Each structure stands twice: as structure tokens, then as C-alpha cells.
Image (spheres, rainbow, N blue to C red):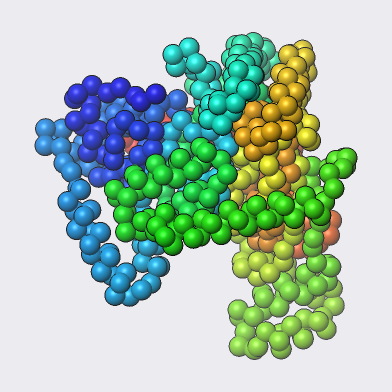
Amino acid sequence: MAEQFTDEEQKVLSRFFTNLDKPVFALRNLPEVVKGALFSRYSRSSKSLRRVLMDEFINAPETGFKEIVNFDTEKGGNELVAIKKAEEFYDRVLVGYGDDSVAELAGAHIAVENVSNIATKILQDGRIGLSPLEKSTRYVYFDQKINDHYLYYEEPVLMASEFANLYKKTMERLFDTYSKLIPEVSKQVMEKFPIKEGVSERAYRSTIRAKTCDILRGLLPAATLTNTGIFGNGRAFEYLLTKMYASPLTEVKVLAGSMNEELGKVIPSFVKRANDKYGQAQQEFFSETRKAVEEVTKETLAEGILEPASSVRLVDFEVNHVAEIKAVTAILYSASYLSMENIRNKALKMTADQRKKIIDEYCIRRKNRRHKPGRAFENIYYTFDILGNYGLFRDLHRHRILTQERQYLSTRHGFDTPKELVEFELDDEFEACMEAANTVYKEIAKTYPKEAQYLVPLAYKLRWYMTLNLREAYHFCELRAMVQGHIDYRKIAQEIYLEIKKVHPVLGEHMKFVDMSESELERLESEKKIDKKLEEISKKYGS
């Protein structure tokens, strides 16, 4: 489904992308500020990245794009020669110094389009050295068709099997229902929340659209095609590509090859080992280890009845006074010249009130959630076993300063029905789709358990665990509990906060910017703030 560009557009765009006819491509000849703005707009648009650049940057005089990049459409430009020279230079540096950390000093932006939600989570698994952004299910409707075909991934193993027609039929039903319910849900949301005085038409429309998307996103299957952009350094990309090559999923392995090819055009020295003899040895290590763990799991754990579970369960933490002693020791250490052992011995002899006073002094001056507690809180850890729908997992997956590990996506744990669909009396149709997907999933999973994941709608639940330190917990809970967030992940953040406060009341006491309120029109206040910012920009730069 290569996008078509006119000859003139191709002449212009060829300067900024490594190709114009493939779904995977890297960016070049663009300043960092433009790349950041471009990816930000991309996440809220149904257009391809190249089309966004053409329509909303190059062809929009008010952006000042031509002046920013010193771009002349008549002259064009190409930096392939410069890249070749740079590759030779870096090869010499790597040989001379033998230090792979050099690869962390060169980065690239890459766009991956028309990729499934299964693959995007694998692309975004890297926590260090990669910064991903993805097309949002909250701001973009996924009801488009190309050549009378909804945008979902046709998994090649399944397409070559006896399940091909069943797979496509299930996809069509999910997308048909999603598309059909958009106007009905939007209408009922507007009737329930009519526009109020002082709210702009722009803010109201954006809020209603976000609410409609939030309610219906559970119908979208994991095979839904989306776009993602990633900025990263060479070392991180090399590691990501090596892991992708070792994936059991065809889509991910093919993507690895495409990304390797395009990144090789902009940072060739830093990604060439992903699939050379060293990379292939590492791929084998990843692949064989995964298979061995799956096998030993079958031998060790008999498949039984899945027990009922709460959405958040704290499964590992330290006894309260031990956690406080750790925190106090670390707090005092940075302002002292004593050894840690000496300080810890003194902390062991403190009363609870004495420990509390030190912890209070460390945190009491926080005025908002951006005033993060210091690194002393990185010494206290928690592990949570979480059961939540795939949609909310996608939202929380982007947090990097923690450890997350998920199970395979399935229909085993049931699904969440949005309360608004019950209120609007549209839940029967929604749940009928969920049951149909469940039936087909179970049939296909008997033969193709990994490929069957593509069938699972975002409303279905999966398990994953999160291990995070107290400092990250402050950031996570206070950010994800904000009123403009999706209600599903807000509840997870609120429950994590309550669990921490229960076991460590003194340490959790200063996590005071966790919003425990309920809101039914989540985005409205944020959209009103955007209106104010737009006014300020208009005054500063003109309309």
C-alpha cells in the first residue's frame, strides 16, 4: 500500500527520507526541533509521516519550514556522500578505541508505518536509548479503509492456513462494529455532556472525539495497523534489531530487516552487527533461551483453572521499618562524609519519629508532581502483579524506569466493557463481538498460539508485572492518575498508590499529587488549557 506522490513531491521529499515507497524509512536533513514537532503531529494524525511533512510543514508557509532548514526546492540536496565518509571515520574510531559506547553518540529517527499493535509493543520494549511515539487510539479514528479493506495486519502464517477466511471475517466484524458505533456513541456523549459557556468549539469537539475513541478502542484488534516513530542511539537500535530478528513472529522479523536496511543508510556503522555473525549468534541465544523457558514452564506448571484476581496485587516489598532505614541512610549519605555502614548503624538505632522527621525534610517542600523526590527513594522496590486490558497496558508500557514483563496476549482473562456502553445500551453489540473474537481465538490458538494474538481485541485482559522503585512510583502514580488520563489506567495508578501507602505509610505520605477524583469528560480541562496556550502563541507570533 505504498503512498503515491507527484513527481514534484518526490523531488522535495527525497531529501528528507531514505525512501519514498516503503513503510519503513529513516529521516535525514532535518533539524532536531523539526523532527520532534513532526513526530508529535504524526501521533495525532491519520496521515503518513511523509504526507504530514509535505502538507503541514513544507506546504504551510506559517511554519517557516523553508527558513528553518535552509531548504530550496530547486536545489534539493543529498547527504549520501557525507554518510559514506562518516561511516569510514566511525569505523576507524571503533577500531582505534574498541569502545561500543561510541554508538551511543549517534542517533537516528525512524518511522515504521502500517505495523500491528503486537509489533509496536515489541518495537517499544527497549527502555534505554530509545524514545518511541505512536499513533494514538485516543485522537484518531481507526475506521479508514484502503481499497475497501480495513487497516489490519494479515498475519502470513494464518493467511496460508485453513483459518485465513475466519481470521479476516473476525477482523471485519470488529472494525465494522467499531466504525458503526462512532457516530452513535459521539451523539450520546454530546447529549450527556452539552457544551458549556466558556468552552470553545475546538476544545469541545476535541474532548468529545477523545471520549468516543476511549469508549470504543476496546473493539480494535491487536492486528490494527498503526504508525510509530522512534528516536534512538546506534547501540540501542542494534540491540533492538538483534532481538527482533530472534522473534517467533514473522512480522517482527521482517520489520527487523526493513529497519536494518533503512538505518544502514543513516547510521550504518552502528547497526551492521545486528545481523552479522555476531548478531546471529546473539539471535540464537535469545531464540533458544525463549524456547527452553517455554518448555520448562510446560513441564513445571500444569495448566489449571485461572484464579480470580484483583487488577493490582503487591507481591513483593520490604518490611516497613527496613524500607525507612534504607531511605534514611541514603538521604543522610549524600550530605555526610561518613561511610554508608556507619550511617546505617545510626539509622538502625533511630526511633520511628526520628526516621519520619528525616523523610519529611526530604519531601515536605514538594509543591507539584514535577518536584520529584531524590535518589534516596531509588533504594526501595515494589513488584506488582497486574491484570488489565491490553488498551491500558499499551498506555503504561511506555514507562521506562522500571521493569515490565508481560505474558502472551489471549482471551483467557476476560474483557472490560466500558460503563458508558452499558449506559447507552450498546453493550450487547460490544460483548457479542468480544465473544465472537474469543471463539475464533481459541480455535486458532490450538495450532498457532502466538499468531492468534493478532485476533485479540484491546478490551481483553492480560497479565504483566511491574517492578519499580519508590522514586519512579511517585512519578508513575502522580502522572497516570491525572484527571485527563484514560479511566482504565488511572485506576491502576490509584491502586498502586494505595498499596504503597498501606505498607509504607511514612514513605507514601508525600505522594500527595495522586488525583483520586472521578471524571467523566477527561480531556476537557486539558483542551481548555490548550486554548489558552493557543491564545498566547497568537499574541506572541500573530494569528
Closest to the observer, 501 or 21: 21
Q: Look at the picture and state if 378 lies above or below 39.
A: below
- The quarter of the rendered structure image containing the N terminus is top left
**154 on left or right of 458:** left
The answer to whether residue 259 is visible is yes
Q: Look at 76% across and 52% down and name the residue there.
A: 297
Closest to the observer, 381 or 365: 381
Q: Look at 67% across and 84% down and name the residue there.
A: 340
- Residue 517 image point, x, y percent: 74, 38
- The quarter of the rendered structure image containing the C terminus is top left
- Residue 512 image point, x, y percent: 71, 52
- Residue 22 image point, x, y percent: 35, 33
Q: Look at 23% across and 64% down and name the residue there.
A: 89
Closest to the observer, 422 or 236: 236
- Give the number of marks: 0
The quadrant holding residue 503 is bottom right
**180 on left or right of 46:** right
**264 on left or right of 392:** left
Q: Look at the picture and state if 434 lies above or below 135.
A: above
The answer to whether residue 459 is visible is no
Q: Residue lying furthest left in this view?
A: 75
Q: Look at the picture and state if 373 lies above or below 76.
A: below
The quadrant holding residue 420 is top right
- Residue 534 image point, x, y percent: 42, 32
Q: Look at 44% across and 28% down and name the residue there.
A: 45
